Image (cartoon, rainbow, N blue to C red):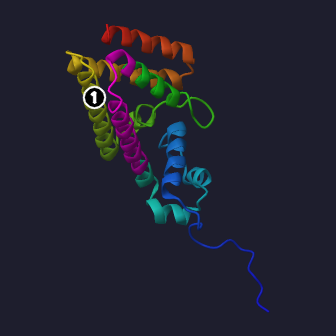
Amino acid sequence: MVQKSSTRPRGRPRSFDPERALGAATERFRTRGFAGTSLDELAEATGLNRPSLYSAFGDKRAFYLAALDGTIERSARGFKRLAERHLPPRSMLELLFAAVIDGYMTGEDRPAGCVFISTAATAAVTDGAVRARLAEFLAMEDEAIASLLAAAGDADAAAHAPVVAAVLHSLSVRARAGAGRDELDALARAVIDLVAQ
């Protein structure tokens, strides 16, 4: 009679979902940053062991870069969905700011803001690949916001887009610093009034 082994099988679990694992890792990076996140913490967050992490994503830096790439893709899809609604400037901006603030106010144990603004801006100082992705994210964001504003009839869309983006970035920092929802909403309303007057 052959006895079944009670040891855990090697390798990735059968239910391994790379997108889900990457999402969990992104949340851990968003909370603790690149330098502040260990491989053991990534293993805990994803439910994968270290060899499986290396096999699926490479080292910690490669995992972080994949998290940034995934954030760019998700953000671009979000902007595209908003564009498909064909809203006037004020309604579009209200929806944009509400969605972004909703995201910023989440986190593993407290509001964590945006993974790019809260963590990549620091890592970019010494890592060229992170810096390139941060630049890509900012360019995508500026272009998407300008396109949304132009489609909504804003004659100054190119000038207003970086202002809107700058306030989005400030909201990320403020959320991470502990600002409440009312404070973030008030700042969003101020820029909406400025842009969509």
Q: Secondary structure at mark 1?
A: helix
Q: Quadrant of residue 13?
A: bottom right
Q: Is residue 76 left or right of residue 17?
A: left
Taking 34 as reference, is 83 above or below it?
A: above
Where in the figure is residue 148, as x and y percent of width and height? 29, 26
Main SS of the magenta segment?
Answer: helix
Magenta-drawn stretch contains 71: yes
Quadrant in which the C terminus is drawn = top left
**Residue at figure coordinates x 41%, y 25% from the top left:** 96
Taking 60 as reference, is 188 above or below it?
A: above
Taking 92 as reference, is 55 above or below it?
A: below
Q: Residue furthest right?
A: 1
**Residue at figure coordinates x 59%, y 68% from the top left:** 14
Q: In the rendered image, is residue 36 in sight?
A: no
Quadrant in which the N terminus is drawn = bottom right
Residue span colored magenta = 65-92
Give the crowd class for mark 1: few <14, some 14-19, many >=20 residues within 10 Å: many
Magenta-drawn stretch contains 47: no
Q: Which residue is nearer to you in this view: 44 or 145? A: 145
Q: Is residue 49 left or right of residue 146?
A: right
Q: Which residue is nearer to you in this view: 12 or 120? A: 12
**Residue at figure coordinates x 53%, y 31% from the top left:** 112
Q: Quadrant of residue 12?
A: bottom right
Where in the figure is residue 11, as x and y percent of width and height? 57, 70
Residue highlighted by disc 1: 142
Q: Quadrant of residue 79?
A: top left
Taking 11 as reference, is 33 above or below it?
A: above
**Residue type, mark 1 in image:** Asp
Where in the figure is residue 135, as x and y percent of width and height? 28, 36
